[in-house]
Image (tube, grey):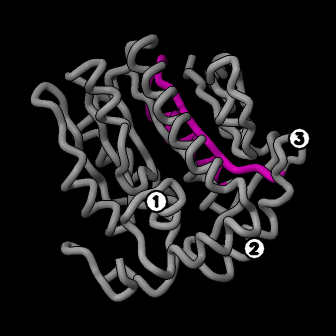
Amino acid sequence: MSESHTPSGGSARLNTGVAHNARVWNYWIGGKDNYEVDQQVGEQVAGMFPIIRDIARADRWFLGRAVRFLAEEQGVRQFLDIGTGLPTVENTHEIAQRIAPESRIVYVDNDPIVLVHARTLLTSTADGVTDYIDADVHDPDAILERAAQTLDFSEPVAVMMLGILNFVLDAAEARDIAHRVMAALPSGSYLALTHPTFDADLGGEGQIPAMKFWNENATPPICARSREDIAAFFEGLELLEPGLVSCSQWRAEPDSPLVVPQFGAVAVKP
């Protein structure tokens, strides 16, 4: 796409002159829904921190493994995907409804390009439901209120928060968002979450200058956190095996060598 092109259905919030996370992420995983400015910033970040493309792909693969695990092994039939990003292949509803066609999925995002593409591409099976909420992660009460119109909060829900709380810069607010969402859901619900880290044991030191460049040249601003800070999102929940690990290692094949500085975990509400 050229920098001046605006997809049909875009809104006044659409700014194609500034790189945006959803579109840069799409660029890193080989998608086409991005602009010249996104490609330029994406290339600059990748030059500073070459593993970023591996992180983007590993995060996507984590999504697939987590949804399959939750739908197949745990019997989850409701998913709340907060910060869904641009549709690619093997989206949450596609995996869940392939396993159980009656599954109900609500996607949440506040980027107009994401919402335009979601409504066009993310269509449900006849037996299930796929819905979309235009809302901001900073307003969990609005997300819950609107999601309750589609999901039954008396039954377990799997909340997917992949690479989203890193855009909530205040650590206490980020913890509060995770806790408030899970507090509204019944026992047997799940939280699947990924988050970038600067921890050296996962090779995260390079995130710091790359994120500084990002915050000066793109939107929204982002942060990395320590293992301890990310573990706090799961307070009151029970982490499932293998616990909080590099998202590329979570229930991956035994011979998978890739380790990326992005934590991932799935936990259940007792």
* Relative to 142, 230 lies left or right: right
Question: For the residue marked with disc 1, what is the amino acid?
Answer: Asn
- What residue sits right under mark 3 in the picture? 201
Query: Magenta region: which residues?
Result: 173-198
Question: For the residue marked with disc 2, what is the amino acid?
Answer: Lys
Disc 3 vs disc 2: Cβ atoms closer than 8 Å?
no
* Relative to 105, 84 lies left or right: right
Q: Position of residue 118 (x, y in %)?
A: 27, 54
| The quadrant where residue 269 appears | top right
Up/down of 139 relative to 39, above or below:
above
SS category of the residue bearing label 2 = helix
- CA gap between label 1 and label 3 equals 27 Å
Q: Mark 1, mark 3: which one is toward the viewer?
A: 1
Disc 1 vs disc 3: Cβ atoms closer than 8 Å?
no
Give the mark nearest the N terminus, 3 or 2.
Answer: 3
- What residue sits right under mark 2 in the picture? 212
Q: Is residue 187 magenta?
A: yes
